[in-house]
C-alpha cells in the first residue's frame, strides 16, 4: 500500500511539472494516447478542440508571425476550426497568409480530430 501511495505521489508531481519544456512533449504524447483509447462517442468537442489547438500551436512555432496569428485565430473555437476546414481544406479557397505545405499540414491536423470535433 505504501508503494502505491508513493507511486501516486510521484505520478501527480510529474503531471504537475510536466508543463515545462523538457517533459511537455512526453506528457502530450501520453495524453493523446490515453484520449485515443477512449471510445469516440465518449469524447467531447472540447477534448478534440484542445488537441487541435495544441498541435497547431506546436506546428506554428516553425512558421512566421502572421501565420502563427492566423492559425491561433483559426483554432480559437469549434466554429472557427470548422469554418477554416470548410474554406481552406474542403473548398480550397486561396489564403495569402497560409498556403502550400503549411496549409496542407494544418488541414491534416484538423482532419485527424475532425470526427471527434464534429460528433459524427
Image (cartoon, grey):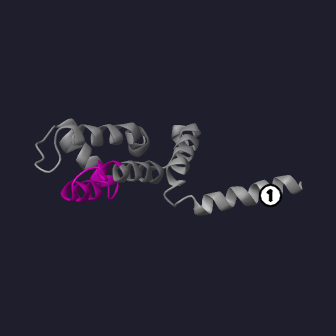
- The number of numbered badges drawn on the structure is 1
| Residue 117 picture quarter | top left
Q: Residue furthest front?
A: 22
Residue 111 in percent (x, y) is at 34, 37
97 left or right, relative to 68: left
71 left or right, relative to 2: left
The kind of secondary structure the magenta stretch mainly shows is helix
Q: Residues within 10 Å of mark 1 (few under 14, many from 20)?
A: few
Point 44% across, 48% down: residue: 48
Point 33% across, 48% down: residue: 59
Residue 82 in percent (x, y) is at 29, 47
Look at the image and give the residue range highlighted in magenta. 59-81
Residue 36 in percent (x, y) is at 53, 39
Magenta stretch: includes residue 6? no
Point 25% across, 56% down: residue: 68
Magenta stretch: includes residue 60? yes
Residue picked out by circle 1: 6
Task: Pick whichever, 48 or 13, lies toward us.
Answer: 13
Quadrant position of the C terminus in the picture: top left
Residue 72 in percent (x, y) is at 29, 58
72 left or right, relative to 45: left
Point 52% across, 60% down: residue: 19
51 left or right, relative to 12: left
Q: Residue furthest right?
A: 1
- On screen, residue 8 above or below 95: below
Quadrant position of the N terminus in the picture: bottom right
Task: Pick whichever, 112 or 25, lies toward us.
Answer: 25
Q: Secondary structure at mark 1?
A: helix
Amino acid at each position: 500500500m505504501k508503494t502505491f501511495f508513493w507511486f501516486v505521489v510521484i505520478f501527480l508531481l510529474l503531471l504537475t511539472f510536466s508543463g515545462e519544456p523538457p517533459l511537455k512533449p512526453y506528457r502530450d504524447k501520453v495524453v493523446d494516447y490515453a484520449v485515443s483509447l477512449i471510445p469516440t462517442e465518449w469524447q467531447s468537442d472540447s477534448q478534440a478542440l484542445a488537441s487541435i489547438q495544441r498541435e497547431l500551436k506546436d506546428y506554428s512555432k516553425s512558421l512566421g508571425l502572421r501565420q502563427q496569428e492566423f492559425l491561433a485565430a483559426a483554432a480559437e473555437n469549434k466554429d472557427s476550426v470548422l469554418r477554416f476546414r470548410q474554406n481552406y481544406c474542403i473548398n480550397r479557397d486561396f489564403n495569402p497568409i497560409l498556403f502550400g505545405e503549411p496549409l496542407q499540414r494544418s488541414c491534416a491536423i484538423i482532419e485527424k480530430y475532425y470526427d471527434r470535433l464534429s460528433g459524427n
